[in-house]
């Protein structure tokens, strides 16, 4: 449930909506676990607003960041937590395939990267495409390292990416926005 909050009547309207959902679930003999719900307020202002909502007698906790369909949403509308999470997952996956496929052919290494690591970095990018340079670079660094691993080289990953004819992740994200 979401609503633009302009005044206290909007806060009350959300609580009314939650009560209607709870009553509908009771009427249809469904159980909804209110303790699994979270409340998050999206705004760019510095002032913190505390909005307390209840569902089935349980106070819904207010969070600064929550995960929704695999994408971390921050109350300040920044992608820092999400990029950190994605890069952490991608590094773990890359190091896993580097250990397992150390003696594999370059083609097998490339297929492993393209199917196991790159999708982690591209999931949902139409929603969360980073705009800060350090976030873009932290994602690209993983691909540079993967390119060096695929080719078995120690030199610059940028040239290796060109040899492999891989696009930068930034270019791939740009194409999905079009």
Image (cartoon, rainbow, N blue to C red):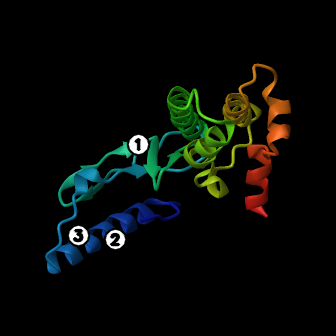
Residue 164 pos. (x, y %): 79, 41
Seen as rendered, the residue at the extreme bottom is 28
Q: Residue 151 vs residue 104: left or right?
A: right
Q: Residue at x 54, y 28 (%)?
A: 95
Residue 91 pos. (x, y %): 56, 31
Could you say whether the residue bearing mark 2 is in a helix, strand or loop?
helix
Q: Residue 21 vs residue 174: left or right?
A: left
Disc 2: which residue: 17
Instruction: Please give the count of numbered marks on the rendered protein.
Output: 3
Could you say whether the residue bearing mark 3 is in a helix, strand or loop?
helix
As drawn, the label of residue 47 is none
* Residue 78 visible in the shown view: no
Q: Nearer the viewer, residue 70 or 55?
A: 70
Q: Nearer the viewer, residue 56 or 100?
A: 100
Residue 13 pos. (x, y %): 38, 68
Image quadrant in which the N terminus is located: bottom left
Is 149 above or below relative to 5?
A: above
Tag 2–tag 3 contact (CB < 8 Å)? no
Disc 3: which residue: 22
Disc 1: which residue: 63
Is 160 above or below relative to 13?
A: above
């Amino acid at each position: 449930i979401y609503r633009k909050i302009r005044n206290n009547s909007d806060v009350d309207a959300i609580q009314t909506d939650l009560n209607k959902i709870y009553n509908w679930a009771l009427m249809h003999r469904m159980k909804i676990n209110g303790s699994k719900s979270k409340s998050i307020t999206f705004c760019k202002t510095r002032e913190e607003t505390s909005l307390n909502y209840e569902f089935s007698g349980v106070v819904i906790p207010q969070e600064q960041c929550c995960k929704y369909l695999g994408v971390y949403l921050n109350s300040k509308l920044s992608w820092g937590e999400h990029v950190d999470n994605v890069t952490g997952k991608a590094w773990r996956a890359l190091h896993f395939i580097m250990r397992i496929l150390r003696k594999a052919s370059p083609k097998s290494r490339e297929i492993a990267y393209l199917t196991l690591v790159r999708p982690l970095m591209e999931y949902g990018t139409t929603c969360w495409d980073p705009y800060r340079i350090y976030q873009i670079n932290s994602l690209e660094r993983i691909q540079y390292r993967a390119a060096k691993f695929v080719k078995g080289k120690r030199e610059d990953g940028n040239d290796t990416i060109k040899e492999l004819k891989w696009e930068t992740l930034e270019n791939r994200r740009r194409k999905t926005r079009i």
